[in-house]
Image (cartoon, grey):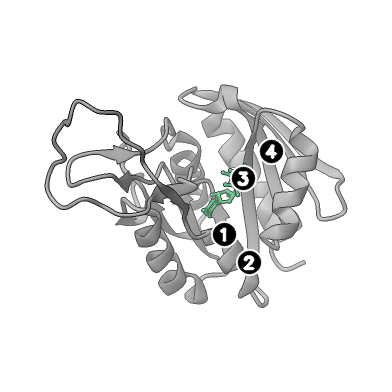
Amino acid sequence: MKILITAGPTREYVDDVRFLSNASSGRMGYAIAAAAVAAGHDVILVTGPVDLPVPEGVKVTHIETTDELRMSCLELFPACDGVIATAAVCDYRPARRVVGKMTKTGEPIVLQLVETSDVLAELGEQKGDRWVVGFALESQDPRTNAMRKLRMKNCDCIVLNDTSAISSLENTVEVLSPEAATIAEFGGLKTDIARQLITFIQTKIAGR
Ligand code: CTP
């Protein structure tokens, strides 16, 4: 299969040197990309800035902002069989990016933020016969929130994990179906989870 994978954080610039972002390490997405290549798939990784080597055999597009993630995904998705979205996308960006570097005024400043595009929701909307696997990182009411995201983004399944996954080598995940059933549970090193997830997608999600 040809698989699109998103990974890492996005950045939203306040001015030319400062940005809003998050602590995503990209490890889960990179591990999934490596596992998919090892399983014989063609992998395109669209990644935000992370401190990890690109796994051998993976085609990569580097992005910074959510807009860049969106443009790359919209271009690449039509030629793929499915997408696995692990990217930790900034939900808000400054309403305007200041040209150059802002200087201090001695006064408090207010940063107005506007919502970014929901990239996975757009891919889900136009998926046709392609499959869509989302991730949900939840700290409260995890199943309800994950199911809301699955439906909103038209996912074939959603991988639920909690905030302990951030920056960790390990993870524990639960895969939920559109019927809100737990259809798989994996735990351990992110590299092991990645292998199990790829096998699961090959056998249970792709070509359903
Ligand atoms: N996602 C995306 N574009 C966004 C936000 C999220 O593609 N602007 C994708 C993520 O890569 C993930 C899924 O949607 O696969 C859920 O992301 P998450 O951050 O958990 O949820 P949000 O939709 O951002 O909702 P909230 O921040 O309110 O929890």
Sequence-wise, the earlier of marks 1 and 3 is: 1
Nearest to the observer: residue 65 or residue 199: 65
* Identity, as a three-letter code, of the amino acid under mark 2: Gly
Ligand 1 under 8 Å from disc 1 Cβ? yes
Rendering coords of residue 145 (x, y %): 74, 42
Q: Which mark is on residue 83?
A: none
**Can you name the residue that lies furthest to the front here?**
107
Q: Which residue is mark 1?
A: 120
* x 43%, y 38%: residue: 26
* Identity, as a three-letter code, of the amino acid under mark 1: Leu
Q: Secondary structure at mark 1?
A: helix
* x 15%, y 53%: residue: 99
Q: Which residue is mark 2?
A: 124
Query: Label 2 crowding class (10 Å Cα cut-off): few <14, some 14-19, many 20+?
Result: many
Q: Which mark is on residue 160?
A: 4
Q: Which residue is mark 3?
A: 135
**Would residue 186 appear left or right of 181 to someone viewing this image?**
left
Q: Are the two marked residues, 1 and 2, in contact with CB atoms closer than 8 angstroms?
A: yes
Q: Are the two marked residues, 1 and 3, in contact with CB atoms closer than 8 angstroms?
A: no
**Between marks 2 and 4, how big is the CA–CA gap?**
18 Å
Residue 158 lies, with reference to residue 41, above or below; the image says: above
